[in-house]
Amino acid sequence: MSQADFATDTPVSTTPVLSVGPVVLPAPGRTVDLQMRVSAPVAGSELPIILLSHGLGFSNNLSSLNGYAPLANFWAAHGFVVIQPTHLDSRTLSPRPDTRRAPAHWRSRVEDMKRILDRLDEIEAAVPPLLGRLDRSRVAVAGHSMGGHTASLLLGARLTDPRDGTTVDLKEPRIKAGVLLAAPGRGGDALTEFTAKNYSFFLTTDFSEMTTPTLVVAGDKDDSAFLTVRGPDWHADPYTLSPGPKSLLTLFDAEHGLGGVSGYDVAETTDENPERVAAVAGLSIAYLRSELHPGDSAWKAACDALSAAPDPLGRVESK
């Protein structure tokens, strides 16, 4: 088994995937209706669900339902239904998003995910090949960068609302496991002046109540210098500062794009590495298989394959 094939016993997946988008949910009170992409294997039943939250990159379309194809396609090919909403801070909705509006979106992003779970019947009806095939008892959330912050709130992280000083708990009990990809770490003195001023909700991030099982993925070269004064280890905070059960995948020589998870051949990826992307996709799906299906040995097998590789792409630790 190569490092690119952690999630499967076969070297290459030939499972056909259907991808439908935009699927639109009417959303009264939201600036625009909620648009999403739904990807799933053509065959199979009792399919677990992954809600995938996009980040805030420089491209016009990747931070939307149109991004993260290397992950969404792989996960769908390995038996998951992947639902990708376009959040209100996407450039596809506002060509020049005003960072002063950003504090309003940390909450609306979470509300998008909860709305999806509330209305799975409508999503199934909009994608007829999915009818009766979802396993609603097995739901996970994943997110990259700002999407990692969104996912962390759904997994139990908390913050203080900068508008009124109240403690915010948005944990979603229907979500059983998570994957945080290059997610933000703690606030306070770890933040740059820019981050504290423009993303004040980051200041009070608290992982001490994030109890849902989670795989945290961080690159050891992900400096994110405009966000934090801490360096790459800041992205490991969701693991370090939260209670178990958790696992941390540290990717060697990986920067914020983790090899290019946000899209195929993305020019803004500073550390393009298809093998690294394949490892992220494979290890993450192995983790979710084992968390959502107790007794499944995929995660152990993936960790063993990683550690046994002659030139491993990263390392895993757990608590």
Image (cartoon, rainbow, N blue to C red):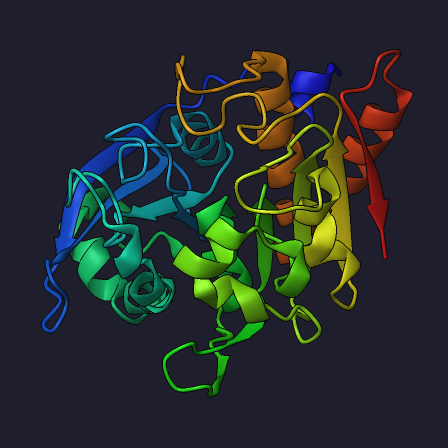
Asked if one can make out residue 79 in the rendered structure from this viewpoint, the answer is: yes
**What residue is rendered at 30% in x and 71% in y?**
118
Task: Check the image and report above or below for 121 versus 127.
Answer: below
**What residue is rendered at 29% in x and 58% in y?**
100
- Image position, residue 162 (x, y; %): 42, 76
Q: Quadrant of the N terminus?
A: top right
- Image position, residue 81 (x, y; %): 40, 45
Left or right: 41 in relation to 277: left
- Image position, residue 129 (x, y; %): 23, 42
Task: Check the image and report above or below for 279 versus 216.
Answer: above
**What residue is rendered at 21% in x and 37% in y?**
20
Asked if one can make out residue 140 in the rendered structure from this viewpoint, the answer is: no
Residue situated in front as seen by the camera: 248 or 70:
248
Residue situated in front as seen by the camera: 281 or 250:
250
- Image position, residue 282 (x, y; %): 62, 30
Q: Quadrant of residue 305?
A: top right
Q: Quadrant of the C terminus?
A: bottom right
Going by the picture, which residue comes out furthest to the front?
193
**What residue is rendered at 61% in x and 47% in y?**
228
Q: Quadrant of residue 240?
A: bottom right
Residue situated in front as seen by the camera: 212 or 260:
260
Residue situated in front as seen by the camera: 231 or 46:
231
Q: How many marks?
A: 0
Task: Check the image and report above or below for 84 versus 265.
Answer: below
Left or right: 55 in relation to 256: left
